[in-house]
Amino acid sequence: MFQNNLYKLLIIFLYVSNFMLDFSTAEDKEKLLIITVATEKTEGYERFYRSTKIYNLDVKVLGMNQTWEGGDVRLYSGGGHKVNLLKEELEKYKSNSDLIVMFTDSYDVIITAGVQEILKKFYKFNAKVLFSAEGFCWPDESLAEKYPKVESGKRYLNSGDCSEFSYTGFMGYAPQLYEIVTSSEIKNIDDDQLFYTKIYLNEELRKQWSIKLDHKAEIFQNLNGAVGDVELRFRETDSYIRNLAYDTTPIVIHGNGASKIALNSLGNYLAKSWTLKKGCLSCNENKKKLGKMKVQNVPSVIVAIFIEHPTPFLQEFFENILLFTYPKEKMDLFIHNNVEYHVNDVDQFIADHKHKYKSITYLKVDDGYQEWHARNLGLEECLKIDCDYYFSMDSDAQITNPKTLQLLIEQNRLVISPLLIRPNKMWSNFWGALSSNGFYARSHDYIDIVKGTRK
């Protein structure tokens, strides 16, 4: 696998999301603290953190830039390190009976409301501690029958999933939460889900700390096994999730287990990223401008060109590349030609223009490289010269806007692409969704995106 931060591959990734107003007061904010665990700033973490800032929520991040000691929970149960980190933090608030603490994942969670709405829903439960719920009894299925019966809703305390730092979402008053996490010792490599499950299943402790489950996703929506329960809905100025199974509007959306792809899709709209009225708001966030940069400071780019089958208008394709407004002295070309018919076209282009570019690497037909090998070599070349961006182009993709490369880089995304379509056809250069076996599936927004009615 390629190392992070060594290159940025420019392929499709459309950002779109939600819009809600937050009228939280200073007094409200003093009553709610969100705590999470994250050891590094992944894209999932950045998405979560953005949502908390959108709704003006106070967040405390534990473990950042520290070594994770909770085991590889992708392979086996673990995660006790999270409990111990929380125990240490709650020591500060153990006497604050007015403070409500929400403890949630950061890598696969999006929050969609502010303090007032969160507290309003929590108070309705008349509980001191509230855990999220799901339809699976994990990590120990043998405990299923020990759970209290429920007439409606998910029965089991949410167990997170098998990916690192995906754990139970819960909230409650600081003193009660402190008593829970200090009620017994837990090793860093022990299972945190089992730790909380055993406490909940103990009727005496459940009553002592007034613990309840969010059976109907009033606050916490765990998507694993429940993607079909939810629907993305739109108001004029916001987007939100509706749980159709229980007629609720959850506000902490958790992509646990196999539901992370679904969360990515929903995340395109939630947390004020996209609205019917203004379109993609998040697209204008964190952009960088190249226009006033000195040429020596402009990011370096490998433009990788793949001619894998006979291509009409290949000369026009090369002319469009020449018209790129991006400084050519900051561009390295990597060309793989696998078509004998186009040898003269490629040779002529290189002979006429090689002096304009920083370098040109040319894999000829006679070199015998298969397509997969050539594409891998292109990425390896980017790593070798420590390029900032890698822009992959197939010869049958005509890019007619000379500012395309500059506009893509200015979006400041790790993965991005121009949207390519065929006029009057439901075809594009991206898959809206993936099926369970990893192949193409049509997403709910695919047609609107291809038609250009959703931007």
Image (cartoon, rainbow, N blue to C red):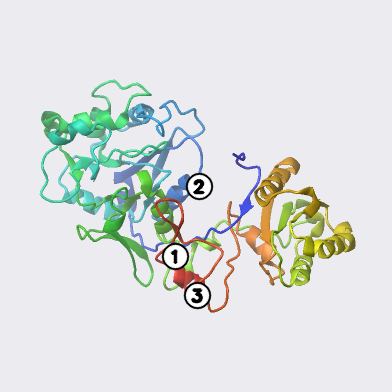
State how far apart marks 1 and 3 are (Cα).
Answer: 17 Å
Up-down relation of residue 237 to residue 138 (above or below): below
Number of numbered markers: 3
Taking the view exactly as shown, the residue that stands out farthest to the bottom is 424
Query: Mark on residue 43?
Result: 2
Three-letter residue code for mark 1: Trp
- Up/down of 232 relative to 188, above or below: below
Q: Nearer the viewer, residue 218 or 119?
A: 218
- Determine contact: label 1, label 3, CB under 8 Å: no
Q: Is 420 placed above or below 9 here? A: below
Identify which residue is drawn at 33% across, 29% down: 83
Q: CA distance from mark 3 to mark 2?
A: 28 Å
**Residue 312 appears at what percent x and percent y?**
72, 72
Nearest-to-viewer mark from 1 and 3? 3
> What residue is pinned by disc 1?
274
Please state the horizontal and vertical placement of residue 32, each as a whole percent of the image.
Answer: 31, 45
Mark toward the start of the polypeptide (1 vs 3) = 1
Q: Quadrant of residue 200?
A: top left
Question: Callout 1: few (<14), some (14-19), or many (20+) C-alpha neighbours within 10 Å?
Answer: many
Name the N-terminal-most of marks 3 and 2. Answer: 2
Residue type highlighted by circle 3: Lys
Label 2, residues with CA under 10 Å away: few <14, some 14-19, many ≥20: few
- Residue bearing the label numbered 3: 451
- Find numbered disc 2 in the image and state the secondary structure of the residue it sits on: helix
